[in-house]
Image (tube, grey):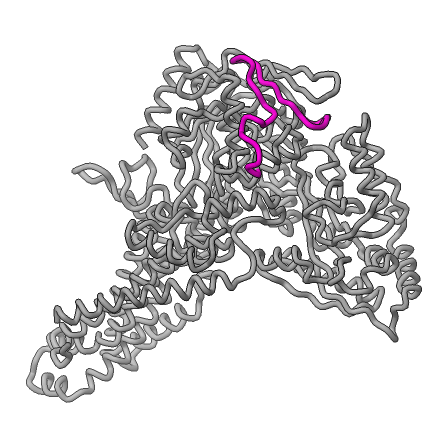
Amino acid sequence: MYSFIAKRLAIAVPTLLILIIFSFILMFAAPGGPFGGERPPPAAVLANIEARYGLDQPYIVQMFSYVKNVVFYFDFGPSFQYRDRTVNDVIAQGFPVTLTYGAWSALVAVVVGVSLGVAAAIRQNTWLDYLAVGITIGAQALPNFVMAPVLVLLFTLGLGWLPGGGWSGGLLIDACDAGDRLCFNNPFGGAVRFDYLILPVIALSTSYMASIARITRSSMLEVMNSNFIRTAIANGLPMRRVIFRHALKPALLPVISYLGPAVVGMITGSVVVDVAFSTGGIGQFFVNSAFNRDYAVILGITILVGALTILFNLLVDVLYAWIDPKIWY
Amino acid sequence: MTFKTKLLASTAALLIVTGGAVLADGHATHPDTGVALASDQSFTYSILDDFPSIDPALVEDVEGASVARDLFEGLMTEDANGAVQPGVATGFEVSEDGLTYTFTLRENAKWSNGDPVVAGDFVYGLQRAANPETASEYAWYLEVMGVENAAAVTAGDMPLDALGISAPDDFTVVYTNDAPRPYFPQMTTFPTTFPQHRATIEAHGDQWTRAENMVSNGAYVLSDYVPAEKLVRSRNAMYWDNDNTIIEEITALIINDSNQALTLYLAGEIDVVMDVPAGQFPRLNAEYPGEALSLPSSCTYYYQFNQSDSGPEALKDVRVRQALSLAVNRDIITDNVLAGGQRPSWTLTHWAIAGWEQPEIAVASMTQDERNAMAVELMAEAGYGDDNPLTLEIVYNTSDSHQSVAVAVGQMWKQTLGVDVTLANQEWATFLDTRGEQNYEVARGGWCADYNEPSTYTDLLTSGSAYNDGKYIDADIDALAQEAKFAEDAMPLYREMEQIASDNAYFLPIYHYASVRMIAPDMENWPTENLLQNWYSKDLYISASE
């Protein structure tokens, strides 16, 4: 098992390198550049700017020095769009935000999705099943760019319960202000505030939750009809024990393989959530950095997502081996 | 957080010490207007995009410039109408040839750390902006100002001290220019010319604009900046005119979606929305009278005709260009398509530029029917009609409003002139390449004023302008532009340039911009007359609700 993990991590390095090279080729193939706009600066000014960012060098030199800086100094370079910041700054500021609402979304999606799926499967063809399937189809059909404004309309403008956007320090803050909803002071210092978190988490987790519920339901149905479950029931084991002890673990295998990329998707945030709720996460940079031709930010985020994807796929494989004794690496 | 608290505490302490009773007392009134002031003098506004930079030497967008104007103060500043008034300088003298400006600084101006603001800070700031190592995109502004040797210094061909600015003593700044510019004092209100605190910048390098490092000399200091989320500035207790400042704290929220910003405004979380989608103005104006404002914004929207070798033969024919221009019903575009207070345009120069009078453009005063008839005639003369239809492609950068305009224009050309129009939208950076390399037939363009004088627009009409993407060359316009640089009264010359451009339909002006804002009813003194949309938080205040 350990040698398997070591081997997978070793393969990750060339994978990431290929990712970097491909991103470089695509970036330089795209027309336009990071500087300019309606009013491109005069040639001398543009030359100064390009010299400062090393863009006057041949592509291959740029690529080598980029890889060298990343590998040896963990330096992802300066942002071209935000002149006072480096890519490390951009990620250090935005990633904790997306990680916070992404992790909560993942938790909500798994807990609600699995419960709905299991409930629907063991009460197949009852009103509970129809309700669960109805909810999941509805949730999957409703894209989050529609849901986000509807949530704001309902909970902010209509009911006035939750803030319509912003982040304001996020989950952990120094202290609650008077009148803050869903804010809890910690007797040991600091406070936890959920109000800014709720709408982004609902908007982000719903469609993942729906997918998880549907996968769980069909996989659970399959497992419940298998011989070992029939045997367990025939042996007179209580239903609760059959489900949680014997059926759930194998039924979750397909859910886990779905979760690898899904969790990466959630913790690296979403453009829609960042724009609709102004959370300040890195999700918005996926699109913005490409539009702005902010090469260093594009690369930094690509590498981040690439590395996380490799990591989570590895985690999924390890979990597989733990759940299913038949799998051995 | 702790920094901010400390700062607020020290500000409050100072207010009490200096007897700034205006704010200590919740029922205080405004010294000039006598309006009762709210006890909470802080407000929140929303902007669409994060600031590329708030370093005055690097600032390159309108919103970043607003922040820089709050945090820093230049030699001169502006009143609510945009008229020049003393800033750090109490005044200036101009030499007889109009080339040398001598500014006298006030002696009580201080940096936020208590250091006096001296002439050397202005010299340092300007040299830093011009320095090739700073790589400021706005280094070109110094060239437009006419500062001596600006282009050579930026290109690295001359040392920094060759730049036409000097400090004979601590309270005198002397600018040496290569041509007289009547609007020069106005240009010293622009962030690129602001003073900078050398010790801070040298100590912190690229990190000097962080809230914990920044030293500034304006009415406000930077107290918090969370990129992509918000920027907070609060009073600078060291500011020389702090006693007359009322607003305590300003928060700029970065909200990438203008409809979301509007929602937060309606929920009472934001006091000012900078960019309301234009199409929403009529509804908002009806539902929230007095809160939805349409202000003239000094930009002009136009279409370029590619008249270079790569352009279509038809567009080299002045009759075709005129016909295309005449057939565009600008009133329909401003009133029905955009509906945000924009005005139809027949010139590049914005109608609201100071001292500007439109030239006598005959077609502008015709009815659209007359124009259409004339357009049909011109088109027939040029040999295009049902048997030989003209085909054109309009390229624009992806955006709903650009698309609406292109659809409308295409429809007008089709209906009136029988032109077969195809529309093509491109993503922004790609579009700029396409237009800059003349790979188009008709392309959307927009231009915004950098200073309140016509040459900020008319320079674009010259063949030497790097932004003349239509690549038209007119010797008369070039000669007039040269003459205008040294003319006593350049206005008639500017008008003549526009007249020639219009007669030849070198490009197709469509409308002059307006920007639509939502401003809370208790926000007072928001400038509506400043064409460049410059605003200073120190001039604002919040009235007490009844």
- From this view, report whether residue B115 is shown above or below residue B40: above
Q: Nearer the viewer, residue B57 or B353?
A: B57
Image coordinates of residue B483 in percent, x first then y, are 81, 33
> Can you give x and y, in whole percent of width and height, for residue A294 in the image?
47, 53
Q: Nearer the viewer, residue B275 or A214?
A: B275
Q: Quadrant of the N terminus of chain B?
A: top left
Of residue B257 and residue B137, the one placed in the foreground of this image is B137
* Rendered location of residue A159, percent (x, y): 42, 49
A231 left or right of B414?
left
Q: Relative to residue A78, is residue B389 drawn left or right?
A: right
When the figure is inspected, residue A218 is found, relative to residue B374, above or below; the finding is below
Residue B438 versus residue B171 in the image, above or below: below
Is residue B458 visible to the viewer in this orientation of the structure?
Answer: yes
User: Residue A178: where, in percent of width, then height?
Assistant: 32, 35
Instruction: Say above or below: B252 vs B221.
Output: below
Would you say A297 lies left or right of B87 here?
left
Q: Residue A226 appears in which quarter of the rendering?
A: bottom left
**Chain part drawn in magenta:** B155-184
Tell me which residue sits at (33%, 40%) in the image: A180
Q: Was residue B162 drawn as part of the magenta stretch in this picture?
A: yes
**Residue drawn at (72%, 49%) of the image:** B468
Q: Left of B391 or right of it: where is A296?
A: left
Taking depth in this image into account, of B428 and B132 the one nearest to the observer is B132
Q: State yes or no: residue A36 in magenta.
A: no
In the picture, residue B62 is in which quadrant?
Answer: top right
